[in-house]
């Protein structure tokens, strides 16, 4: 493709994802040029480990992600926060990585973005490394999955408990509106529902977690047949598969993991709750409705509904609540979907001293405006274009593509779901947006929370009841003491070969992209680079 004379004279990056879905199961050519996909291969080891390869030779780097299908939804009442705890623990020592674990190795081999994340549904461990360090990363990730849990001793657990508890204190307990998600979750999802508690868990559960509790949780969920290893970037697939089989192959399969099934959430009445927030300076109103899980056909229209209500000068929430009534400086709606359920939320942060009943009245006016005018085709097209741009930008790195493949594999049941996902985004109509509003929002029961500054109960919505929140009592010297210098002693897991750190591969060579030049009739020089990764132009 060449730059035509009428395009903007700038650094030009044009990209088109391959129109071939290169899976083991399906290597057929796709005829529709609008069908985009990430070419990949899927392999399954005998122990059940799913392995996904995406080859991308554009840069001499490789992204490696190990994702366990275990988030807070796999926990039990009274034993919450374990999935998030392991996000921390797995960056520490393992039997063959030794002290410093992945963090130390990443710094030494030139890795970038070494991190982890925990959600309701999965826990991710990921980083990008130079291609000559791929075998090292495969070795290290295998060590985490099969040669790790023996290194978790009482002192190690005691230290990491405090790290996680301190994170909760900073991000939740001592943060304005920090308990809002907790109150919504407790009242939106019934007792026993996997989303009834928060990902970070409770301080009490973390404190009470025994070493055996932690080991049992790991042994149950961190197994090859409950994990996906994704490798994306510049690498040799045949060689990589040999390394994966070598380092992961003898890790034992775990129990069969059954798919979690839950009934759709139904609220029999609207719940109004208030909470006096120690750190909030102004009152905040939140309204939350139960909706649908990720990739449900209605999730796409709900996402557009949230965007339209919130973004732009014409957005009903902005137009009525912020500009006309001037009762809040922030108002937005959003759709949040996960594996088992979804929710649609509306949030308005009021001005200092503003009664939240007046904010609620303004919200109702904004929603009435939407019911009257709906969404125009121009606004629908604008939002779709923005969504697609953001989506493709997320695929512009090998790590981004690897993450997307993994998410589809676990949550959609097919790593090749991208083509259908984009079609579903593009297919949303004006009627769909109206329909999901009437199906899930209009006249439906919801959870309403009024978070008000300390001593300002009168600002909460009328007829609200006090939300039950377990707040930690601050007691000097209450924390356990531990000696971080203690070297853990443990029994080593047997292996059929010596699991020492492998050597580097051949030094990577950087391929500099060709830059072409053209001169417009006006004399302006144009520089361009052709790039075939994502369908975006800059």
Image (cartoon, grey):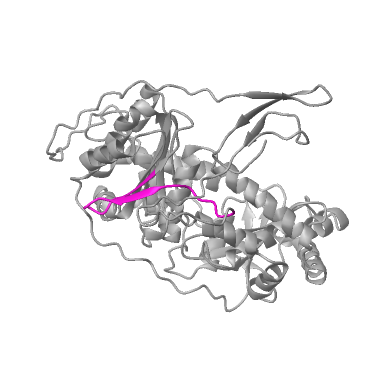
What residue is rendered at 64% in x and 24% in y?
Answer: 516
> Residue 222, percent across and down?
29, 50
> Residue 415, percent across and down?
43, 54
Q: Which residues are magenta?
A: 34-53
**With 247 as the anchor, is 57 left or right in this view?**
right
> Residue 286, percent across and down?
66, 60
User: Residue lying farthest right?
Assistant: 324
Q: Quadrant of the C terminus?
A: top right
**Nearer to us in this view, 290 or 479:** 290
Q: Is residue 342 above or below residue 61?
A: below
Check residue 394 for magenta coloring: no
Q: Is residue 186 above or below residue 330?
A: below
Q: Quadrant of the N terminus?
A: top right
| Magenta stretch: helix, strand or loop mostly | loop
**With 510 as the anchor, is 153 left or right in this view?**
left
Check residue 44 for magenta coloring: yes
**Nearer to us in this view, 340 or 11:** 11
The answer to which quarter of the image holds residue 233 is top left
**With 278 as the anchor, is 357 left or right in this view?**
right
The answer to which quarter of the image holds residue 104 is top left
């Amino acid at each position: 493709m060449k730059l035509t004379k009428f395009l903007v004279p700038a650094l030009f990056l044009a990209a088109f994802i391959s129109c071939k879905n290169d899976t083991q199961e399906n290597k057929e050519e796709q005829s529709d040029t609008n069908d985009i996909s990430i070419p990949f291969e899927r392999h399954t080891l005998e122990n059940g480990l799913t392995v996904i390869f995406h080859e991308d030779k554009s840069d001499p780097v490789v992204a490696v992600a190990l994702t366990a299908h275990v988030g807070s939804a796999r926990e039990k009442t009274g034993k919450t926060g374990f999935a998030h705890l392991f996000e921390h623990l797995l960056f520490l020592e393992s039997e063959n990585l030794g002290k410093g674990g992945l963090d130390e190795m990443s710094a030494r081999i030139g890795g970038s973005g070494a991190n982890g994340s925990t959600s309701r549904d999965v826990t991710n461990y990921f980083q990008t490394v130079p291609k000559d360090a791929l075998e090292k990363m495969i070795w290290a990730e295998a060590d985490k999955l099969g040669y790790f849990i023996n290194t978790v001793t009482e002192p190690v657990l005691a230290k990491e408990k405090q790290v996680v508890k301190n994170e909760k204190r900073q991000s939740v307990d001592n943060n304005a509106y920090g308990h809002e998600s907790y109150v919504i979750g407790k009242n939106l999802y019934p007792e026993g529902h996997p989303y009834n508690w928060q990902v970070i868990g409770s301080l009490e559960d973390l404190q009470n977690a025994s070493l055996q509790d932690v080991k049992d949780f790991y042994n149950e969920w961190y197994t090859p047949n409950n994990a996906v290893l994704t490798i994306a970037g510049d690498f040799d697939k045949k060689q990589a598969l040999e390394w994966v089989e070598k380092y992961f192959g003898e890790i034992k399969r775990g129990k069969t993991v059954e798919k979690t099934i839950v009934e759709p959430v139904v609220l029999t009445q609207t719940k109004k709750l208030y909470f006096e927030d120690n750190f909030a300076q102004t009152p905040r109103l939140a309204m939350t409705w139960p909706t649908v899980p990720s990739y449900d056909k209605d999730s796409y229209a709900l996402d557009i509904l949230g965007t339209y209500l919130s973004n732009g000068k014409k957005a009903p929430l902005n137009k009525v609540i912020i500009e006309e009534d001037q009762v809040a400086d922030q108002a937005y709606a959003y759709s949040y979907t996960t594996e088992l359920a979804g929710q649609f939320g509306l949030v308005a942060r009021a001005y200092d001293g503003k009664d939240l009943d007046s904010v609620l009245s303004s919200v109702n006016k904004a929603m009435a405006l939407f019911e009257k005018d709906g969404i125009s085709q121009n606004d629908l097209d604008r939002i779709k274009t923005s969504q697609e741009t953001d989506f493709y930008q997320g695929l512009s790195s090998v790590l981004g593509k690897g993450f997307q493949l993994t998410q589809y594999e676990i949550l959609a049941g097919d790593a090749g779901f991208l083509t259908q996902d984009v079609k579903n985004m593009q297919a949303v109509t004006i009627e769909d947006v109206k329909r999901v509003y009437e199906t899930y929002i209009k006249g439906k029961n919801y959870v309403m929370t009024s978070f008000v500054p300390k001593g300002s109960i009168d600002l909460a919505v009328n007829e609200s009841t006090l939300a039950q929140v377990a707040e930690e009592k601050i007691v000097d010297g209450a924390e356990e003491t531990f000696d971080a210098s203690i070297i853990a002693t443990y029994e080593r897991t047997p292996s059929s070969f010596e699991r020492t750190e492998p050597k580097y591969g051949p030094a990577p060579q950087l391929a500099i992209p060709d830059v072409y030049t053209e001169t417009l009739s006006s004399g302006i020089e144009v520089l361009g680079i052709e790039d075939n990764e994502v369908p975006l132009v800059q």
